[in-house]
Image: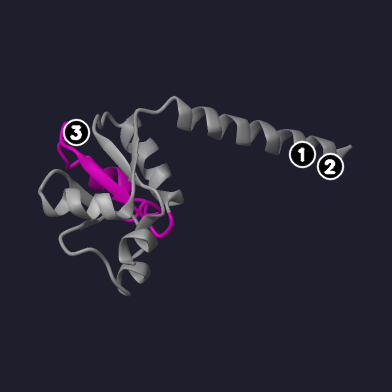
């Protein structure tokens, strides 16, 4: 019985996540296109990985704002909510989370890098 309850809760959680993503205004972009947009000054890159991850490499000029940090909301509150931002993490999962948080905080022009830093590096 407990197994069915856990499975049911897991399925409901996954359905909610899919619906949240579909109801979002966040765009998606490839790593190559993100680098080009950044180079052309079209948007500010935000790296939401941990400091340990960014110490092994990051995109020059990207802002570092660890989404797992307790200070993430405070850090994004200092940004202009109307400007365009391209968000990336290692593979695209945490950046999706960061985009959802930023969207709830009133940011209107957000783009997630599908494939994350991995796709930008190669």
Q: Is residue 7 visible?
A: yes
User: Where residue 90 sits in the image (x, y, percent)?
Assistant: 40, 60
Relative height, residue 96 to residue 108 (above, below)? below
Q: Which mark is residue 3?
A: 2
Residue bearing the label numbered 1? 7
Residue 15 in the figure: left or right of residue 34: right
Q: Which residues are magenta?
A: 65-91
Disc 2/disc 1 C-alpha distance (Å): 6 Å
Disc 3/disc 1 C-alpha distance (Å): 38 Å
User: Where residue 44 sits in the image (x, y, percent)?
Assistant: 17, 48
Q: Is residue 6 magenta?
A: no
Residue sitting at x 35%, y 28% = 25
- Determine whether the residue tagged by mark 2 lies in a helix, strand or loop: helix
User: Where residue 106 sits in the image (x, y, percent)?
Assistant: 27, 28
What is the quadrant of the N terminus in the image? top right
Q: Is residue 65 visible?
A: no
Relative height, residue 56 to residue 108 (above, below)? below
Residue sitting at x 69%, y 38% = 10
Q: Which mark is residue 81?
A: 3
Q: Are marks 2 and 1 in contact (CB under 8 Å)?
A: yes
Rendered image coloring scheme: one colour
User: Where residue 22 sits in the image (x, y, percent)?
Assistant: 47, 28
**Sequence order check: which comes first, mark 3 or mark 2?**
2
Are there few (<14), some (14-19), or many (20+) residues within 10 Å of tag 2?
Answer: few
In the image, 97 versus 112, the foreground residue is: 112
**Sequence order check: which comes first, mark 3 or mark 1?**
1
Q: Are marks 3 and 1 in contact (CB under 8 Å)?
A: no
In the image, 78 versus 21, the foreground residue is: 21
């Amino acid at each position: 019985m407990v197994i069915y309850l856990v499975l049911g809760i897991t399925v409901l959680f996954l359905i909610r996540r899919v619906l949240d993503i579909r109801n979002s205004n966040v765009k998606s972009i490839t790593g190559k296109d993100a680098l080009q947009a950044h180079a052309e000054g079209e948007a500010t890159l935000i790296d939401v990985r941990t400091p340990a991850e960014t110490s092994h490499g990051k995109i020059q000029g990207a802002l570092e704002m660890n989404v797992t940090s307790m200070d993430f909301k405070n850090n994004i509150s200092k940004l202009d909510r109307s400007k365009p931002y391209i968000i990336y993490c290692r593979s695209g999962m945490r950046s999706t989370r960061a985009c959802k948080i930023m969207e709830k905080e009133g940011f209107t022009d957000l783009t997630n890098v599908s494939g994350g830093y991995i796709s930008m590096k190669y």
